[in-house]
Image: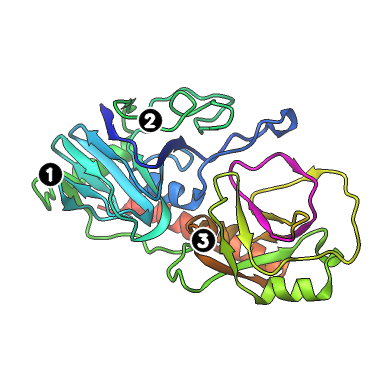
Amino acid sequence: MSITVIHPGLLTTVQDLGRYGYQKYGIIVSGAMDSYSLRLANLLVGNKEGEAGLEMTLMGPSLEIEKDTLFAITGGDLSPTINGEPVPMWRPVYLHKKSVLKFGACKSGCRSYLAVAGGYNIPEIMESKSTYLRAGIGGFQGRGLQKADVLQIKSPREESLKIMKNLAKKQSSNFFGSTSWYLRREYIIKDSQNIKIRVIGDRQFHEFTLDSKKQFLNCPFKITPQSDRMGYRLSGPALKLEKPLEMISEAVSLGTIQVPPDGNPIILLADRQTIGGYPKIAQIAAVDISKVVQTKPGDKISFEEISLEEAERLYIEREKYIQNIRIAINLSD
């Protein structure tokens, strides 16, 4: 079974949960920007959570998909259609005729994820299928998808075959069938006009002036066009240190917020560097990373400080939610 790229969209790459264990060699983690949405897409089609999927940004691709395919679309809403007919998101979809899956206008969010039963038959590089664009490794030939690329699909697992068998009986259109149930859009943005991001003060938080700390936690910041998979640059009140600070470069992680000399924060994301030498004012709570990466240039976000204990509680709560989804899907008919 295969998928042929008719049009690649703005940026469509193969991503899994990342390339861990190689940062000491200078190899970045990479992986899906919205790992939460990718994990759920995989669960919906009976894959393991860490299987690679397609990450589509702002303007999605057009893909010719062979029949007898189980897939799921999660994340941002890029108006997916099959042969012109709207395709439901956040649920398993069984395609029973060779068709064209096309993504259109961006209705909400920024990144959408396409998982297929069995996963994409792509070799692992350093134990990951993720595309690292700057180094040209992983994914499909180390790059974004291009016109006429063909992605081969692996054989579905037993869990996938069970879902396909049930959906084969439900032909809700001439081309595909889908479940009546679906997942709620938890932990991703719902209102793009009021995006609150929870943070924990980082190592250099107290090195900033009192006014800067107040502005950081009380003023909105705009996502600038100078943003990509490596990081989001923000514009807003210029944040200042109490006094010049000489730092030795130290480890950074997903969601670290650095402040360079110009005072405009940078949120480090999936393709972040392995270490950084700018002061770190805050760390985004893991559960809110999905909200951040579903924003786009021009959107505004604001920050709310929480404790480390609260961030841990929210993380455990989300993981329990995912675990319950996994159990429910396995038990569903």
Contact, CB < 8 Å: mark 1 with mark 3? Answer: no
Q: Which mark is residue 120?
A: 2
State the image coordinates of residue 314 (x, y, percent, origin top left).
Answer: 59, 65
- The crowd level at tag 2 (other Cα within 10 Å; few <14, some 14-19, many 20+) is many
- The local secondary structure at tag 1 comes to loop
Q: Which residue is mark 3?
A: 291
Q: CA distance from mark 1 to mark 3?
A: 33 Å
Q: Is residue 268 magenta?
A: yes
Q: What residue span does the magenta drawing correspond to?
A: 263-281
Mark closer to the chain start, 1 or 3: 1
Which residue type does callout 1 highlight? Phe
* Amino acid type of the residue that numbered disc 2 sits on in the rendered structure: Tyr
Question: Left or right: where does residue 188 sit relative to residue 145?
Answer: right
Q: Earlier in the sequence, mark 2 or mark 3?
A: 2
Q: Does the magenta portion include 115?
A: no
- Rate crowding at label 3 as few (under 14), some (14 to 19) or many (20 or more) other CA atoms within 10 Å: many
Residue 52 falls in which quadrant of the image?
top left
Residue 140 x, y percent position in the rendering:
43, 26
Residue at the outermost front position:
262
Q: Quadrant of the N terminus?
A: top left
**Sequence-wise first label, 2 or 1:** 2
Nearer the camera: disc 1 or disc 3:
3
> Would residue 7 be seen by someone viewing this image from the given angle?
yes
Residue underneath mark 1 = 175
Q: Is residue 283 left or right of residue 125?
A: right
Give the number of the disc on residue 83: none
Number of residues whose C-alpha sits closer than 10 Å to that of mark 1, classed few (under 14), some (14–19) or many (20 or more): some
Against 212, residue 293 (above or below) is above
Inspect this view and state whether residue 54 appears: no
Element type at mark 3: helix
